[in-house]
Amino acid sequence: MFAVLIVIHVIICCGLMLVVLMQSSKGEGLAGAFGGGGLSGAVFGGRGAATFLSKATTVLAILFMVSCIVLTLVARGRSTGQVGESAVNRMATEQPVPTQAPAQGQQQGTQQTTPPSGGK
């Protein structure tokens, strides 16, 4: 279910970006840069493009906010561990496995011997 919600959220995000970029600004924006100014006038009428795109922006913005809230609530239920527990605190409370290192200067299974002295 979480993956489906992510896919829906991404589709809403892409749609919102496209609708915002299609809106013409004072300098015709991206809609005019690719010849969209004349096309939108022919398809939607003189003022129809601005009205349709502004309504679509409003609807997609509301859907975006709702999907963010839903994803937050669903993700909270998916978290592992205790709620509010820091990963640093969790790692600090775990007991490490004790290892015994050989003492300094000694190795396991061998004895230190003194070198033979060649006294005269």
Image (cartoon, helix red, strand yellow):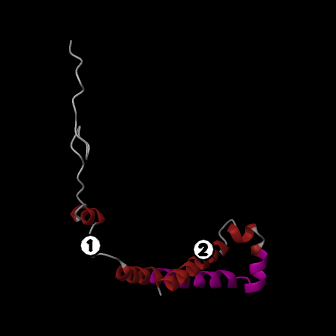
Residue matched to label 2? 17
Q: Nearer the viewer, residue 33 or 28?
A: 33
Q: Is residue 58 left or right of residue 114?
A: right
**Disc 2 residue crowd, few under 14, some 14–19, many 20+, Cα 10 Å:** some
The amino acid type found where label 1 is placed reads Gly
Identify the mark at residue 28; answer none if there is no mark.
none
Identify the element where label 2 is drawn. helix
Whether residue 58 is visible to the viewer of this picture, yes or no, is no
Residues at discs 1 and 2 in contact (Cβ within 8 Å): no
Q: Nearer the viewer, residue 66 or 98?
A: 98
Q: Nearer the viewer, mark 1 or mark 2?
A: 1
The amino acid type found where label 2 is placed reads Met
Classify the position of the C terminus by image quarter.
top left
Q: CA distance from mark 1 to mark 2?
A: 34 Å
Whether residue 5 is visible to the viewer of this picture, yes or no, is yes
Identify the mark at residue 84; answer none if there is no mark.
1
Q: Is residue 92 magenta?
A: no
Instruction: Please name the predominant secondary structure of the magenta segment in the image.
Output: helix
Residue 4 in the image, given as x and y percentages of width and height: 52, 85
Q: Residue at x 25, y 61 (%)?
A: 97
Residue 93 in the image, given as x and y percentages of width and height: 21, 64
Q: Which residues are magenta?
A: 38-66
Q: Is residue 66 left or right of residue 89?
A: right
Identify the element where label 1 is drawn. loop
**Disc 1 residue crowd, few under 14, some 14–19, many 20+, Cα 10 Å:** few
- Please identify the residue farthest to the front as the structure is shown: 120
Residue 57 in the image, given as x and y percentages of width and height: 57, 80
The image quadrant that residue 59 belongs to is: bottom right
Q: Nearer the viewer, residue 74 or 26?
A: 74
Q: Residue at x 64, y 85 (%)?
A: 52
Q: Residue at x 56, y 81 (%)?
A: 12
- Please identify the residue farthest to the top as the structure is shown: 120
